[in-house]
Amino acid sequence: MTLIFNKTGCFRATFICFYQHRKPSRVPTFKDGSLVVNESNAICMYLEEKYSNDSNRLLPVDVEERSQVYWRMFESGNIQSNITVPIVYSIWNTKPEDRNQAELDEKFTKAKEELGYWERTLTGRSYLVGDRFTMADVFFYPFLAFLVRLGATLREFPALKQYYDLISQRPTVQATWPPHWKEGSTAPILAAL
């Protein structure tokens, strides 16, 4: 898998997944020279700290603005814990005849509350923090893209949809988008979103 990290597309790196670097082997594993870094967030932080400059910085220099970026970065995992885990994994791991529809409906209600929070955050702005793409967007966008991949239309969340469309058109996203994702969503298990 190739990562094109910065705004200008200048930096290219290769992700690897070798069993000897991490047991058990998991993706992603990133190797830069002799250094091996595991886990997406750690890789992003490493790349930012090692390779960023004034033209491609994703963490603001201003400490107050950076604190807002950190807040959104770490908060973005709520998409995973409030939507993906309770709904997607539940559907994937439960036979249709064994699913409790009332419980599933409640999970979708909570998922809409989570998306509503992000909708309010993005209303009137293009990015999560400030007026430019930051590490907060790097952390958040993949969670949102996965929901769309699973059929979320975001029809009740116009600011989120606009954000998704904007970030999806970034050259770095287009260059690294999994080819099968370009074909559209999978089984629309999240169509209610």
Image: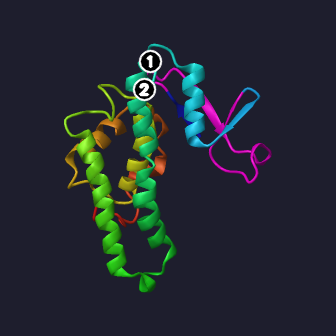
**Left or right, 156 with reference to 78:** left
Q: Residues within 10 Å of mark 2 (few under 14, many from 20)?
A: some
Labels 2 and 1 touching (C-beta < 8 A): yes
Q: Mark 1 or mark 2, which is nearer the start of the sequence?
A: 1
Magenta stretch containing residue 10, yes or no? yes
x, y percent for residue 29: 66, 41
Numbered badge on residue 123:
none
**Residue 129 at least partly seen:** yes
Instruction: State the residue lying farthest toward the top.
Output: 54
x, y percent for residue 23: 76, 51
Tell me what residue is drawn at x 40 percent, y 59 percent. 82
Residue that carries the numbered disc 1 in the rendered image: 61
Helix, strand or loop for disc 1: loop
Helix, strand or loop for disc 2: helix
Magenta stretch containing residue 4, yes or no? no
Question: In this orientation, which residue lies closer to the viewer: 49 or 11?
Answer: 49
Q: Which residues are magenta?
A: 6-32
Quadrant the N terminus occupies? top right
x, y percent for residue 122: 26, 40
